[in-house]
């Protein structure tokens, strides 16, 4: 494998526009972009042959690992038969089969109906329109408000962006779709009500009822949340939290939407986070790992009582759609991917291996003065970093900390995610089939980087000898690392 040609370097600098990226950095003469060109199992390689352990599954997407030829073959077989079927006019065989399979595993129940789109943002957009349109058909067109949670990420299309709880993502795109409201997330580590108590008070769940009452229940269409919230760092819904929100929704006639774009297909154990946490949503949204990243696909999956509202004459149809929603190759990829997860028990493995990873992290860095909390569910884990463990003093505002952490991890051959949309965290969400030796390497590397962070902040000794595998496979070396 060779580095980029001058023509490719120019094209990257002048013509490519990456998502959530400042492209100016690629225009510098010394720009040396890391371009991933190959993947196998839980490993990826860049254009220079450097090898990395992918501890983020691409972007919470490659749950079954890289190099899944079975999925490629399923897509190719479908494309040889027919490459495109209009979702406006005709059902396709893979879409029929996929919808039937999802109805057997989705927490929305056996009568579920799937509306296929292309991404998580589109799935959320669809679910919001579905919920509002459902109320219109029931004679309550004034139900237009949606309650989401602060700091929660739900996508970037205009409706999804409106319920998105990450303020910087909304800034500069107004006016947004009106009616979005936000309540606090279940953030036990820093919850003013129960962080020092022996058990959760469920006050955060009751915030939904308070908001519904404040806004006038007859105007609220839906609530939307992730069972385990990504933004903020694997914020797990406490026991009975989702049950309580379900009760509130039932009492006020509000549609309950659970965003499973990240949680779904084994990430938190079982097929979906809703099921693992005992919730019965009216609609769920899925994307990402549904195809293991081999093709774009998302869906809003509706329970029977929601979907049946749209049955009748032409005036009752759901007036929504897109050209490539439920593409035949994407549906074929999803079916093959679900077969792999099911056959290899990857969704069950996450339930067992995830707690083992968290325990290993606690043994390795749990007592470190800059590690505040290690939390998660299944193989969806976050390490919250603090300035002082005893006081829980925040590291928020530490200049360039996230870039520094990411760089430290990448230099050591591990791809994780450093995020500070709430407090600074390192996120781990590896392929569900990651072997034990890779898990051990990830934990060791994170431990190494946390100790380097401690020296940078002056909370641990200035020298620390470690043995590690270098980024490029060669002899194992012992390094003396300074802050």
Image: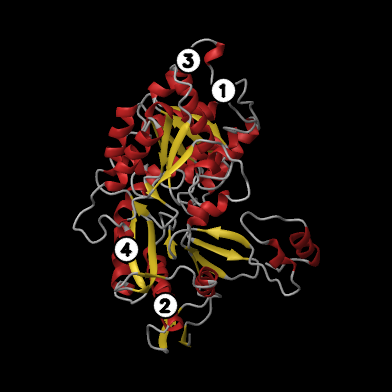
Verify CB contact (< 8 Å) between mark 1 and mark 3: no
Residue 166 picture location, percent across and down: 50, 51
Q: In which quadrant of the rendered view does residue 37 lie?
A: bottom right
- Judging by the rendered image, the residue that carries numbered circle 4 is 358
Q: Nearer the viewer, mark 1 or mark 3?
A: 3
Verify CB contact (< 8 Å) between mark 4 and mark 2: no
- Judging by the rendered image, the residue that carries numbered circle 2 is 448
Mark 4 neighbour density, 10 Å: few (under 14) some (14–19) many (20 or more): many
Residue 332 appearing in the image = no
The label shown at residue 311 is 3
Instruction: Determine the secondary structure under disc 2.
Output: helix
Verify CB contact (< 8 Å) between mark 3 and mark 2: no
Disc 4 to disc 2, how far (Cα)?
A: 16 Å
Q: In which quadrant of the rendered view does residue 376 lie?
A: bottom left
Disc 3 to disc 2, how far (Cα)?
A: 58 Å
Verify CB contact (< 8 Å) between mark 1 and mark 4: no
Instruction: Determine the secondary structure under disc 1.
Output: loop
The label shown at residue 91 is 1
- As drawn, which residue projects farthest toward the left? 198
């Amino acid at each position: 494998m060779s580095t980029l040609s001058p023509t490719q370097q120019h094209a990257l600098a002048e013509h490519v526009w990456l998502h959530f990226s400042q492209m100016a950095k690629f225009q510098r003469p010394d720009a040396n972009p890391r371009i991933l060109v190959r993947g196998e199992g839980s490993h990826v390689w860049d254009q220079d042959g450097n090898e990395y352990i992918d501890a983020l599954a691409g972007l919470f997407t490659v749950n079954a690992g890289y190099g899944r030829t079975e999925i490629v073959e399923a897509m190719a077989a479908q494309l040889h038969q027919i490459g495109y079927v209009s979702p406006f006019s005709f059902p396709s065989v893979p879409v029929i089969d996929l919808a039937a399979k999802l109805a057997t595993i989705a927490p929305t129940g056996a009568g579920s109906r799937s509306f296929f789109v292309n991404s998580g943002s589109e799935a959320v957009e669809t679910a919001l329109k579905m919920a509002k349109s459902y109320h219109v058909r029931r004679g309550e067109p004034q139900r237009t408000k949606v309650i989401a949670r602060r700091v929660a990420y739900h996508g970037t299309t205009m409706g999804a962006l409106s319920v998105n709880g990450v303020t910087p993502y909304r800034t500069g795109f107004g006016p947004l779709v009106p009616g979005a409201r936000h309540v606090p997330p279940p953030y036990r580590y820093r919850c003013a009500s129960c962080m020092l108590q022996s058990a959760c008070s469920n006050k955060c769940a009751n915030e939904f009822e308070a908001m519904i009452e404040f806004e006038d229940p007859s105007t609220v269409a839906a609530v939307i949340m992730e069972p385990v919230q990504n933004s903020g760092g694997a914020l797990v819904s406490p026991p009975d939290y989702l049950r309580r929100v379900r009760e509130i929704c039932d009492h006020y006639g509000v549609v309950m939407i659970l965003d499973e774009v990240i949680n779904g297909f084994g990430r938190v154990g079982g097929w979906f986070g809703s099921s693992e946490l005992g919730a019965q949503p009216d609609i769920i949204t899925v994307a990402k790992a549904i195809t293991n990243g081999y093709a774009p696909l998302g869906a809003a999956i509706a329970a029977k009582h929601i979907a049946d509202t749209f049955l009748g004459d032409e005036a009752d149809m759901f007036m929504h759609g897109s050209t490539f929603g439920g593409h035949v190759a994407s549906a074929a990829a999803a079916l093959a991917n679900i077969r792999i997860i099911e056959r290899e028990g990857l969704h069950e493995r996450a339930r067992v291996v995830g707690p083992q990873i968290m325990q290993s992290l606690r043994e390795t860095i749990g007592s470190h003065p800059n590690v505040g909390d290690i939390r998660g569910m299944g193989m969806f884990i976050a390490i919250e970093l603090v300035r002082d463990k005893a006081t829980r003093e925040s590291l928020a505002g530490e200049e360039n900390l996230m870039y520094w952490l990411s760089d430290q991890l990448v230099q050591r051959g591990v791809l994780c995610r450093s995020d500070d949309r709430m407090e600074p965290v390192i996120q781990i969400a590896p392929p569900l089939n990651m072997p034990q030796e890779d898990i051990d390497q990830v934990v060791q590397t994170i431990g190494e980087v946390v100790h380097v962070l401690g020296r940078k902040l002056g909370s641990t000794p200035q020298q620390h000898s470690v043995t590690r595998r270098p980024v490029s496979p060669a002899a194992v070396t012992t390094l003396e690392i300074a802050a």
